Structures are given as C-alpha cells and as structure tokens.
Image (tube, coloured by chain):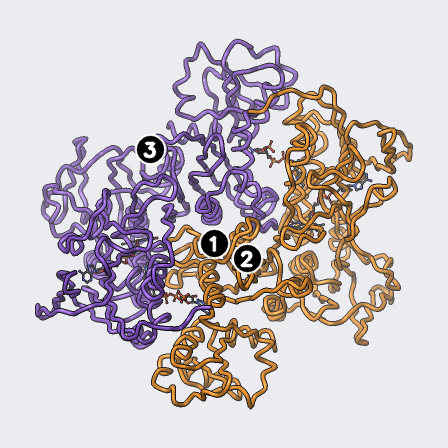
Chain colours: A purple, B orange
C-alpha cells in the first residue's frame, strides 16, 4: 500500500508528446494529481500512432483521425496537462533548471522552469550525404506531417513507380503499402538480404514472397546517386543499375535525436543514444530520458544498445513516472528488441539475439531450426512456420528466437520473448503449457518442439548442420543421405545424395559407410533427426542432420 | 553429452496407443534403438486426433483419414514397434511382470512379459445412472469408433434436433459442430453457467453468443430421465421441463480409466487417478503411468489433481521415456490445466486457478478484469477481449488467467500460462516484451495491462469491486458514480448512479459525498480507474472501481 503523499506542486516538463512522452505524462498524472505537468511537442500532433502511419498511406487504415490516439484537447482535459504543441524546446539550462521554448508558428522564444525534466524526443531518419538526397520527391517517414506529405503526393499524382531504399521493418511495410496503392515498387538494399537484423535463412522466404507479389528486390546494391530527370528520379546503384521512379521512400534506419541533450552537456553513450542509469536518469540531476533516444545495457550481452520500439518506450514512460514521484524505486530491465512485421501475407519477427549477433559478440551458442504448423494439421487452415532459436550449448539459456510464417508467428515470438526476458532456458520452452485445441495449436506447440530439439542437441542426441556448412562440404569426405521418399527424391534431389527413405534405413545400414561423415537431410529436419538417431545407435559416429532440411537449404541458397 | 549405453534388450510394454502411449513409444525408440517395444491398443486405431473428433462430426474436418495421425503400419515401420491393435490388456501380474492380453476379435487370451510397463489408458466418459441412459441414440464421444457411430447416425438419419448434456469444453464443441450439420441443438447444464471451470463473469458472454447462434441453453437444470417416445427421446429435466430430441450427446465429464491399475493393486490417489511420483512411477516397481489416468500435485496448490489434456499427456510421455531409459532423472512438474475452446465465433480459455478454485482452497487472492483489443484499435479488424487474472495480494504471484474474446485469446492465455508455470508474478506480466506491430497487438499488450492493473491494486492505487459485490451494495451507504459520457448514460444507466463524465470529475468534486463509499464505474473499467485516482488524491477514501465496468456487470447479471 503506497502512501499517498505528494511532493506538492512538483513541476514536470516533458519534451516530446508521443509514445514515451505522453505515456510518462499520463502515468504521472495518475500518481500525482497535484503536480504541474507541461508537455512540449514541436509538431502539431501528440499521441499519434507512429506504427500505423504506413497503413494509412496504404489505405488500410482509412480514417486519418484514427492515427490520433489523443488530441491535445482530449488529453489535456482528461489528464489536466498543459499541452503545448508547435513548441520546440531549443535548449536546456540544467543549472537554472530551465528550458527554452520556441513557438514554431511565431518564432517567439520563452523559458520555462522545471523541477524534473523528461526527454522523449525520439529518433530521426538517417539521411546519408548521397548526391541528390534532398530532391523534392524523396520522402522519409516519422510523423503525421511526413505521412500527410507522402499521402497527398500519392493521391495527387497517382504515381506509377516507387523505390524504397532500405529493407528493414519500415521499408518493407512501406513497400507493401505502396503496392496496395497500385504503385509498382522496387526495394533497394545494400545487405544481401531483407531484414538484415535477422539471420539470412530466416529472412530468405521473404525474398520469394516479394517475387510472388511482384515487388522487385535489389539486394547487395547501394544507392550512389539520385538524379531528377524530367518528372522522374533516377536511382543510380553501385552495381551500375539504374532504376527510375516517380518517388522515393528512404528507410535506411534512424538515429536517436540527442541534439538537446548533447548541447546541455548530458552524457551520450557509446551507441550515440543518451546514457541513462537503471532508473532512467541521465547524467544530469533531475533530467530523465526515455524512448528511442536512450541507450541501455542489453539484457543478454550487457552491452549498450538502443531499442527503436514503441513497447519499450511505453514501458519506460510508466517506470519513469513512478521513479520521479515515489523516488528511484523501479529499475528498467532493458529490452531484448522484440520486433515483428507483417509483409504481405507473411509475418516475420525476432526477439533477443540472432546467430549473427551472438557471433559478432563472441558468445558461444548453438542454433536450431524447426518447422511446425500454426495449429493442428488435421484442422483446416494450418500453415507452416519456420522457427529458429539460439541458445547456450551448456546451460541451455535461450538467447534469441526468430519466426517467419503466415499465421501464429506473433504468438510464438511472444512466448520466446517471455522466456528470454526471464533469463529462461530451452527447458522452459518444453514446459510451456500452451492452450491447445485444434484451431489454435498442436498438442506439442512449436515452442515445445524447439525446446525438445535444442535439448537433443545439447545432450548430443544429434548434431545439427547449418545450410551454409552443408553447402561447403568436401564431397569426397561426406556421405549425403537423403531420407525422404523416392517420390520426393525424384522431384528435387541433391546431386551427391543417396536416397534411402527413413522407414528403410534400418534395413540398409550396410549401404552407409562407417568411415565418412554422414550428412542426413529430409524435408524440414524431423525425419533426418529420427534417421540420425538410428545411425548413432548403430555405431555411426559422425552423423549430422541438416537444420531445416532441404526446404531451408533451397530457400537460402537459391 | 549423453552416454549412448543402453540396457540391451529391455522389453517395454505400453497399454494404450494414443496421446500418452504413442508419444512414449516414439521417444523410447528414439533414445533406445535396441529395445523391444510392444504397444497394445484395444481399439482398431492408434495415434488418433481425439481433439479433432468433434470437428470431423461437424464436417469442418472433411477427411476421416486426417484424424489418424499415424496408422499401426506407418508407426510400426517408422519406429520399429510391435503394435497390436484390437488387443485388450485385461490384467497385470506385477510379480511375474506379465500382462494378460485378449484379442478383441477372437477372444483368445495370452500373456506377455515386460521389463517395464507403461499405462496410458486414458479416461472414460461419465455415465451416471439416470433412467434411460442406455437408450440407443444417446452417445458419448471418446474415440474414433464413437465418432463413426455419431457421424453415421447424423448422415443416415439427418436428425433435426439434439440435446447436448453438459456444457464443458467437449459439450460446447459438440454443440457448435452439430449446429454446423444443420441440427437444432439444445444444451442442458446443471450449473448456472456454461464452462463451469471458469468464473461466471468470464463465461457469461458465451450465454449471449449461444443466443445469437440460436442454440438453446438450459442452465441450472439437470436431466432426471431419458425416455424413448416413438422416434425421439424425451429429456426430462429437474425443473419439469421436457425437451424432445432425435439424439443426445452426453458430455458431463470423464473419469480416469483405472480398472487395470486398481486390479493390480497399484495405488489410486485421492482424486481417483493413478498415483504417480514425480518420475511418473506408480506405487509398483517398473510400472509407470501417464495421461488422463494419473493424478499429480497441482503446481500451485500442491493438492492432487488430474489434467484431461493432450499437451500434458504428450509431455509426460517424453519425460517418462527418458526416465525409463536413462534412469529417473527427469521430474514431471505437473500441469496448471491450460485449456481452450473455440465456441462459434468466440474463443474461451483458462489457465491456472480461478477465483472460484482459489476460494474453495482457501487461498487468499485478488482478481482483476481488463478489456483490451486483440490488436491496435486503429488497425482494421481489432476485437475486444476480456481478461481476468487472480494473484497473491502481497507477493503478486500470478495464480490464474481466463480470457474470452474473438481473436488473439490463445496468445494471451499462452503468455499467462508461461508466467504462471514459471511461478511468476504480475510484475513479470509487465515485463513481457511482446512483438508489436499494429496487426498483432498494441504498444501495451493486454497482458501488460493486466500486470499494471494488478500492481495498482496491490499498491492500493485503487480498489477493485466485483460485479457481484456491486450488485449487493446497500444503496443508502453508497454513492454510485458513472463516469461515462452523457450519451452512454442516456442509453443504459444504473438507477442509483450519478453521471459525471470523467473529464468533468475534477470540476465536480463538490457533488461527491465524502462520508459515503464511492462506487465508480465506466464502460469497462479504465475511465473508472482514472476517476478513482482523481478522487483518492482529493481526499476521498473509500473509492471502488467496478471491475470490467458496466459491460461485465450487465453480461453477468442479465
Ligand atoms: C513509420 C513508423 C512505424 C513504426 N512501427 C513500429 C512498430 O510496428 N512497432 C514498434 O514497436 N515500433 C514502431 N515504430 C517505432 C515507435 O514509433 C517508436 O519507437 C516510438 O514512437 C518511440 O517513442 P519516443 O517517445 O521515443 O519518440 P516519438 O514517439 O517519435 O516521439 C517523439 C516526439 O518528440 C518530438 N520532439 C522531438 N524533439 C523535440 C523538441 N526539441 N521539442 C519538442 N518536441 C520535440 C517529436 O516531434 C516527436 O513527436 C515505428 C516508427 C515509425 C516512424
Ligand atoms: C472429443 C475429445 C476432444 C478433446 N479435445 C481436447 C482438446 O481440444 N485439447 C486437449 O488438450 N485435450 C483434448 N482432449 C483430451 C485429450 O484427447 C486427452 O487428454 C488425451 O488424449 C489423453 O491421452 P491418454 O494417452 O491418457 O489417453 P487416450 O489418448 O484417450 O488414449 C488411451 C487409449 O488407451 C486405450 N486403452 C484403454 N484401456 C486399454 C486396455 N486395457 N488395453 C488396451 N488399450 C486400452 C484406449 O482405447 C485409448 O485408445 C479431448 C478428448 C476428447 C475425447
Ligand atoms: C494515448 C497514451 C497517452 C495513453 O497512455 P496511457 O494512459 O498510459 O495508456 P492506456 O490508455 O493504455 O492506459 C493504461 C492505463 O490504464 C490502466 N488500465 C487499462 N485497462 C484498465 C481497466 N480495464 N481497468 C482499470 N485500469 C485499466 C492501466 O493499468 C494503465 O494505468 P497505469 O499506467 O496507471 O497502471 C499513450 O499510449 C500514447 O500517446 N500512445 C500513442 C503513441 C504511441 O504509443 N505510439 C507508438 C505506438 S503506435
Ligand atoms: C503421432 C505421435 C506418435 C508422434 O509422437 P512424436 O514422434 O513424439 O511427436 P512429433 O511427431 O511431434 O515429433 C516430436 C519429435 O520430433 C523432434 N522434432 C520436431 N521437429 C523437428 C525438426 N525440425 N528437426 C529435428 N527434430 C524435430 C522433436 O524434438 C521430438 O523429438 P524428441 O521427443 O525425441 O525430442 C503422437 O504425437 C501421437 O500419437 N499423436 C496423436 C495422439 C494425440 O496426441 N492426441 C491428442 C491430441 S489430438
């Protein structure tokens, strides 16, 4: 039971009126009815749904009003907050505990004092100094005003072609939404894959899906120059390729907006975000920060990181409000970066650390891939999804999860995230007692299967083999065993593979050499695992099972 | 890394060839290639999808073959298991380590010896001694044969009416599926609600949904007698009501099938299930049991309980196989009874302990109800769901969760289950880092909101009020404050309520008496909470907020 005693007449100033800022303000008022709260927002809107902006452009969200979760009036009335829009905070004086504010309309500047100051200015789109980057029809997307610009460009000009530069979450969402508007979209990405924060074999199905949807994808190619030629923009790529388009969406990333903090002498961290302690305090007394602009220790690596995500911004806002009112009682535990995107009919998402991320940090780990149905195969509408996890090869601690599929992807990501955030292990995945009825899952949920699978690897019951290592096999040292059916083999085979279907393996052990590495594969990995067990228990020693089977191998290598 | 040393030529016998039995067999083979494994099944099928049976009857699952996840031939071939169908195990001799087996076809009996014996005979439908219960067209549903009987009755006779007796998970699934077949269904239930394992305010929306779907519901009424009158059955209820129907589905529950175990002197527990230790060993050496027939300590109460659920049966099977092969290394941690059902367009589910269950066990707890969208409200297709949790009022340990809605119910149940199974608290709900993009969730997921809400209760930021306590208020002692808008008030009001809309509360404090209990309500509870905060911080002390708002109150009381 909290003692309802208040620091009477505390005066809080909040910079930024959206995810982090508005949430801090709302919680502040709920726990401190008497305080004075002023929220400054340089734009004309507060509390807007950043995450919905691409969908409004695409016409999926029809009413613009829906983007405005709260208006300055409604929010001010409900929470008794002094909301000042079109008010740019231009500087902080930490000694006098004042901010300078400029009216965007009139240019007039004034100061306002604070007892406690909260910074939630967000992040801004990266705009590298590529020649032509400031041409008129090159857009970035961060707020409602940007959205209005793109939307009216599309509505007024009915453009036929667009190039989206950068294939991260927002880039892909924009590609889909512009496609919905009838625009022929090309996506340009410098990395060899879309969603570069994911491991490549997990992102690979998206490449095929874009093809199906008739969206052109240019990977491993960077923009060298934008050129205005008549009504269109020529995008010159490093490969020499030139793409013409009526307009461009730049979505190559964001960087924390730290201009105010930097100028005020507030400590900026290694990653370029505002440094905060576990209570969300900056290096300067009575100044706090939340949202896209802060860095914090990653819960797994301990290294500083930034989460450009709405969930963490909301969570931080609430924690911070409590810390400011009740004293520093509540620690922010960091974010493991759970993120998801709908990409046409598919959904792809990530939580925690990928193989690539762990490797870069020198953290020892194993990975496994499982394919499983979104729900019981015998109930109509089940769709396959692919799940990949990474974990500590000794303790089984779960480091990360990635999921791609058509249905039920979000559910499995959330479960993986919950276990990871809780410092859980792959054994915890086995224990997950999911709600099972045929329309929702299988008796063993995909996350249970991941747990089983990973345990089998840890206990040495089978050795997983990544598609990349399989591709690099030295053929003379390896016996490649394809345990699919002869029908499957006849449709698509690997040249040096011998086909012995799983149910015939026991009778054909004599055909398998004992002195070679045995690399087994099947469709997705399950039959290969069962075959590996038979071989291992029959005196074969160097037995590997291709992770994700031929399916992942083909998707990744083709 | 496991040492691949095997107890050569171990001979395992498994009784029952479906969820628990077949899973044990498959894992056994994967970890013990050399063993002899015999699986006895009294019916003609193994590895069938019990949970899919209602949907096959309803025509949702079209092909009967889909119900047979494995056939005796395919399973035998893959796992080198001696599968004997139509083979009833009639007795166990624990001293000689033998079972007697009777061929269902020929009646011939023989014995088979074992090193280790696994019992997974499942549960059988309860058939109380109601007069007429054995009439021809009264069916129960447990296996494929039962399914075939019901399906051919429906196909051959195109019945027009059915009574489903018992409104638990299977009863409701059957009601829906018979409705799909064009049968007019009446559901009879002795309890005052459907899904009696849920708290009544959570189950209440199903009552309305049945009405919408034109399924008749007779609650608080029990069957006294079944009578054959010409071609129909008369169902006589205790209320005096008589319902006529062409056929009846009895689904009033199941009981563990312990006949074999009992006869062999194996210990039966308090609940009527086979007692097993944490390694799934029965009281008799080398005899083990899994599935619907066992009892185990409930992870929350420690009291013996039974889970009639496929997930636990599968989980136990794998644990047991490992324990038999590698020694008793693996503990079964019990099941918190996570269950779910699709009921027409709605989904309802439960995990852990309900208010009713906790009260019955004398466990101190608090509850809260939250309504939230399946995903961001501004993205098309979001649907409201209702979530209720129970938790320890001091530590915040999460005891149980119940969710009902149209979409995304399974996801939130799984998250709640994961936290509960992990002995987690409501603070862990706050930390859940769900995958957020507008089609999947909100920046604060419903499970986060539950965590926030519960914390506010624990910290005394507001006092929740159950709809039942609100209904029992003594009017003269209470000031009922309706903080909805005047429009909402004009459509549906509570007679003794005073309407001051939330945004006007601060200006109207003088209209609210300080000496009375204040019972606040709004639509679903959120605005009421904000009003409660304003009042509490303005010197009002006895302030309550109606859990779930007017919506839950109306649903539950009407
Ligand atoms: C198109 C798009 C899609 C997204 N989709 C998702 C998604 O699906 N899932 C997800 O988790 N996240 C998504 N995000 C990210 C999410 O919106 C951000 O992580 C979150 O909004 C960060 O909150 P914040 O408070 O730090 O910044 P913001 O919400 O951006 O708010 C910062 C505000 O501060 C104002 N401001 C800045 N400087 C000043 C100043 N000096 N004076 C006054 N005001 C100032 C800005 O005008 C801005 O309105 C998306 C973002 C965008 C742009
Ligand atoms: C219609 C229906 C719907 C269901 N829906 C769900 C759901 O949606 N979600 C969920 O989690 N659970 C559901 N269940 C429950 C789930 O199917 C069971 O919990 C699970 O199958 C239990 O596994 P088991 O191995 O103990 O028993 P079973 O799977 O029932 O297998 C027991 C087998 O043993 C055989 N047997 C019994 N005695 C002998 C003997 N003496 N000799 C030889 N063989 C014998 C029986 O013939 C039977 O085939 C449902 C059950 C039914 C009937
Ligand atoms: C609109 C906005 C200001 C709301 O902030 P908020 O009031 O903290 O958030 P919500 O409306 O979700 O309400 C949450 C509060 O209601 C409470 N609550 C929710 N349901 C409740 C119920 N049924 N009964 C009682 N209380 C309830 C929660 O406990 C929480 O209160 P607390 O923080 O005091 O514990 C803020 O979320 C915002 O600006 N959003 C748009 C910007 C944004 O997030 N963009 C990125 C995503 S697109
Ligand atoms: C059919 C049945 C015998 C299968 O049992 P099973 O082989 O244990 O189960 P699965 O087919 O899901 O396979 C699980 C195994 O494959 C492994 N696996 C899953 N995907 C894999 C992949 N991609 N790569 C490698 N291994 C994989 C798992 O680790 C697990 O192996 P393990 O237990 O040795 O660790 C059993 O589930 C059954 O009878 N089901 C029907 C009855 C039933 O459950 N009814 C109630 C629900 S309707």
Disc 3 to disc 1, how far (Cα)? 28 Å
Marks 3 and 2 belong to one chain? no
Marks 3 and 1 belong to one chain? no
Q: Position of residue A119 (x, y in %)?
A: 24, 59
Q: Determine the residue positioned at 12% across, 39% down.
A: A225
Secondary structure beneath disc 3?
loop
Residue B167 drawn above or below residue A82: above
Q: Which residue is mark 3?
A: A361
Q: Which residue is mark 1?
A: B428
Q: Nearer the viewer, residue A296 or B246?
A: A296
Give neighbour class at mark 2: few <14, some 14-19, many 20+ (Cα, 10 Å): many
* The CB of the residue at mark 3 lies under 8 Å from ligand 1: no
Disc 3 to disc 2, how far (Cα)? 36 Å
Subunit under mark 2:
B
Tags 1 and 2 touching, CB below 8 Å = yes
Q: Which residue is mark 2?
A: B398
Q: Nearer the viewer, residue B249 or A104?
A: A104
Subunit under mark 1:
B
Secondary structure beneath disc 2?
strand
Give neighbour class at mark 3: few <14, some 14-19, many 20+ (Cα, 10 Å): few
**Would residue B408 be seen by someone viewing this image from the given angle?**
yes
Earlier along the polypeptide chain: callout 1 or callout 2? 2
């Amino acid at each position: 039971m909290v003692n309802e005693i208040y620091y009477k007449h505390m005066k809080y100033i909040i910079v930024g009126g959206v995810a982090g800022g508005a949430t801090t303000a709302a919680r502040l008022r709920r726990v401190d009815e008497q305080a004075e709260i002023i929220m400054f927002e340089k734009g004309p809107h507060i509390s807007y749904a950043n995450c919905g902006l691409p969908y409004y452009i695409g016409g999926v969200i029809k009413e613009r009003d829906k983007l405005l979760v709260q208006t300055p009036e409604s929010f001010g009335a409900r929470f008794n907050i002094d909301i000042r829009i079109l008010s740019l905070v231009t500087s902080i004086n930490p000694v006098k505990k004042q901010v300078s504010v400029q009216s965007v309309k009139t240019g007039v500047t004034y100061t306002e004092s604070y007892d406690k100051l909260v910074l939630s200015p967000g992040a801004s789109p990266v705009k590298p100094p590529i020649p032509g980057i400031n041409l008129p029809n090159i857009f970035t997307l961060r707020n409602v005003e940007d959205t209005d610009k793109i939307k009216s460009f599309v509505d007024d000009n009915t453009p036929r072609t667009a190039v989206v530069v950068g294939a991260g979450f927002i880039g892909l969402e924009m590609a889909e939404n512009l496609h919905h508007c009838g625009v022929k979209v090309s996506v340009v990405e410098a990395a060899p894959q879309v969603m570069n924060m994911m491991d490549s074999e997990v992102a690979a199905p998206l490449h095929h899906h874009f093809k199906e949807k008739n969206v052109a994808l240019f990977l491993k190619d960077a923009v060298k120059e934008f050129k205005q030629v008549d009504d269109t923009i020529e995008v010159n790529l490093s490969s020499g390729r030139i793409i013409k388009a009526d307009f461009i969406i730049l979505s190559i990333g964001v960087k924390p907006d730290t201009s105010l903090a930097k100028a005020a002498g507030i400590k900026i961290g290694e990653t370029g975000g505002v440094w905060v302690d576990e209570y969300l305090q900056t290096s300067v007394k009575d100044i706090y920060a939340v949202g896209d602009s802060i860095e914090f220790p990653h819960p797994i690596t301990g290294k500083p990181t930034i989460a450009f995500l709405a969930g963490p911004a909301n969570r931080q806002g609430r924690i911070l409000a409590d810390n400011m009112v009740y004293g520093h009682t509540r620690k922010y535990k960091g974010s493991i970066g759970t993120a998801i995107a709908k990409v046409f009919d598919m959904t792809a998402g990530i939580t925690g650390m990928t193989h690539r991320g762990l490797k870069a940090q020198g953290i020892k780990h194993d990975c496994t891939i499982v394919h499983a149905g979104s729900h019981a195969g015998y109930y109509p509408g089940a769709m396959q999804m692919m799940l990949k996890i990474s974990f500590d090869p000794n303790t089984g601690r779960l480091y990360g999860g990635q999921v791609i599929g058509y249905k039920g992807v979000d559910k499995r990501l959330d479960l993986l995230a919950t276990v990871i955030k809780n410092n859980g292990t792959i054994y915890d995945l086995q224990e997950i007692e999911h709600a099972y009825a045929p329309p929702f899952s299988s008796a063993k949920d995909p996350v249970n299967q991941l747990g089983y699978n990973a345990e089998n690897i840890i206990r040495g019951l089978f050795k997983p083999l990544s598609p990349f290592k399989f591709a690099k096999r030295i053929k003379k040292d390896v016996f490649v065993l394809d345990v699919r059916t002869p029908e499957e083999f006849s449709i698509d085979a690997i040249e040096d593979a011998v086909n012995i279907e799983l149910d015939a393996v026991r009778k054909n052990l004599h055909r398998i050499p004992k002195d070679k590495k045995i690399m087994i594969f099947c469709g997705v990995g399950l039959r290969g695992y069962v075959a590996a067990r038979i071989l291992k228990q029959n005196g074969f020693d160097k037995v590997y099972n291709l992770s994700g089977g031929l399916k992942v191998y083909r998707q990744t290598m083709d």
